[in-house]
Image: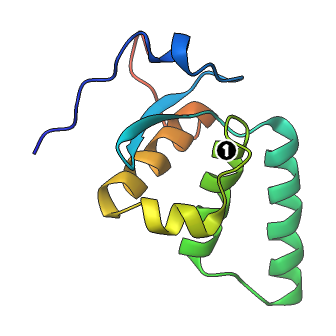
Amino acid sequence: MPLPAFPKDQMDTEPVKFRGTPIYLHGKFYILPPLSVGQWEQNEKDEKAAAESGQQEETLQKTMRLICLAFSRNYPEINQPWLRDALDASTLRECIDALNKQSGLVARGPGE
């Protein structure tokens, strides 16, 4: 079943603080913005500290944390338990791809 098209007027009815990528969860679109510089720096510090202590978090846990941090910029009420219920394999991949692209972690094509 194809996803509904993103309604162009949804931003007018549900304003968000930060631009981002529309992600369809629980019957509506949520805008996933990039991580803030502060979120990026804090996460980088936490990962370095974990690596130095030898206690590495699982990749999925790290990924969920980053996605939750990004969503929290527009939706402070979103938390990791809610995301674990809302995301499936395809929407998890959409979120990962969106964060990577928005953060400049993947090469962009001309005009993107």
Q: Quadrant of the C terminus?
A: top left
Quadrant of res 105: top right
Tell me which residue sits at (78%, 89%) in the image: 55
Relative to 108, residue 42 above or below: below
Q: Is residue 14 above or below residue 9?
A: below
As drawn, the residue found furthest toward the left would be 1
Question: What residue is shown at x 88% (from left), y 54% (from top)?
Answer: 42
The one nearer the camera, 28 or 58, is 28
Q: Position of residue 64 (x, y in %)?
A: 59, 64
Identify the image quadrant of the N terminus. Answer: top left
Q: How many marks?
A: 1
Residue 89 position, x and y percent, is 33, 63
Of 44 and 24, the residue lying toward us: 24
Q: Quadrant of residue 37?
A: top right
Q: Which residue type does callout 1 highlight?
A: Ala
Of residue 96 and residue 16, the one placed in the foreground of this image is: 16
Q: How far across and how far down the image is residue 98, in percent? A: 48, 39
Q: Is residue 108 left or right of residue 17?
A: left
In the orientation shown, which residue stands out farthest toward the front? 13
Point 39% across, 21% down: residue: 109
Q: Is residue 18 left or right of residue 99?
A: right
Position above or below: 60 against 105: below
Tell me, what colour scheme is on the image?
Answer: rainbow
Helix, strand or loop at label 1? It is helix
Asked if residue 6 lies left or right of residue 105, the reply is: left
Image quadrant where residue 66 sits:
bottom right
Give the percent coordinates (x, y) of residue 21.
48, 30
Q: Nearer the viewer, residue 40 or 88?
A: 88
Q: What residue does disc 1 label? A: 70
For disc 1, the neighbor class at 10 Å (few under 14, some 14 to 19, many from 20) is many
